Amino acid sequence: MAEHLTREELGRALGVEAGNVPLPVTARSLTRAEMRARERRGLLWLGGAYLLFGAVCLAVIQLAETSPTVVRWLPAGFAVTGLGLVLYAWLRLRRHRVYEDPGLAVEVGEDAVTISGPSESVVQPYDEVVVSRLVTRSPRNSVYFEGIVLETKLGPVALGDPGFAGGNAAAGAILRRLDELEQ
């Protein structure tokens, strides 16, 4: 018999599984260079696909047994696709120009969560930890744990891999520890 879970219950269950690591767990916010490097790695796949498209265009032009006037649009299509990819890459990388590293570090221990900012540090025992939101994404009948949003004295902290190195492990460790303390 299948058990139906709410989105919050499923996110919590996924987060508890993500937190199956020994404590203490630390996470730190990503720098601008790390954010741009992550985006560049994704764009490299597009560059490879573009080069493969170019090779196919050349092969069709050279090997097709058709009139050259039938395939004369292929070089123009290759150029337009290249311009489109350059524009897409520029737009994706432009988002990170305004990114400022908040300089946050989160340490998940046995008794408390320590959040260190550039100017101050906050220690929150687990009875004071407030998880305002579980973040999941669900493409094509799958559900992935993306992290949590913590309410802290430093403001809301979106703890997850998109903004932190080791963010999902730390977020899952917080959920696991909260789950253990509830029982």
Image (cartoon, rainbow, N blue to C red):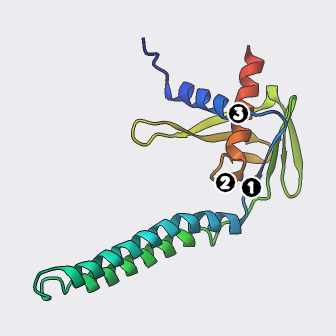
Q: Which residue is drawn at 45% across and 71% down?
A: 48
The reply to whether dot 2 and dot 1 touch (C-beta < 8 Å) is yes
Q: Position of residue 97 (x, y in %)?
A: 63, 72
Q: Position of residue 72 (x, y in %)?
A: 19, 87
Q: Which quadrant of the structure image shows residue 101?
A: bottom right
Query: Disc 3 vs disc 1: which is toward the camera?
Result: 3
Q: Name the residue under label 3.
A: 19
Q: Is residue 180 above or below residue 67?
A: above
Image disc number at residue 44: none
Q: How far apart are marks 2 and 1 (CA)?
A: 6 Å
Could you tell whether 150 is left or right of 143 in the image? right
Residue 23 seen from this side: yes
Could you tell whether 170 is left or right of 91 in the image? right
Image disc number at residue 29: 1
Q: How far apart are marks 3 and 2 (CA)?
A: 17 Å
Q: Name the residue under label 2.
A: 163
Q: Given the image, on which type of amino acid does mark 2 rest? A: Gly
Q: Where is residue 13 in the image (x, y as percent from the top left)?
A: 60, 26
Q: Which of 102 and 39 is in front in this view?
A: 39
Which quadrant is the N terminus positioned in?
top left
Q: In this view, does 28 lie above or below 140?
A: below
Which quadrant is the C terminus positioned in?
top right
Q: Which of 154 and 157 is in front in this view?
A: 157
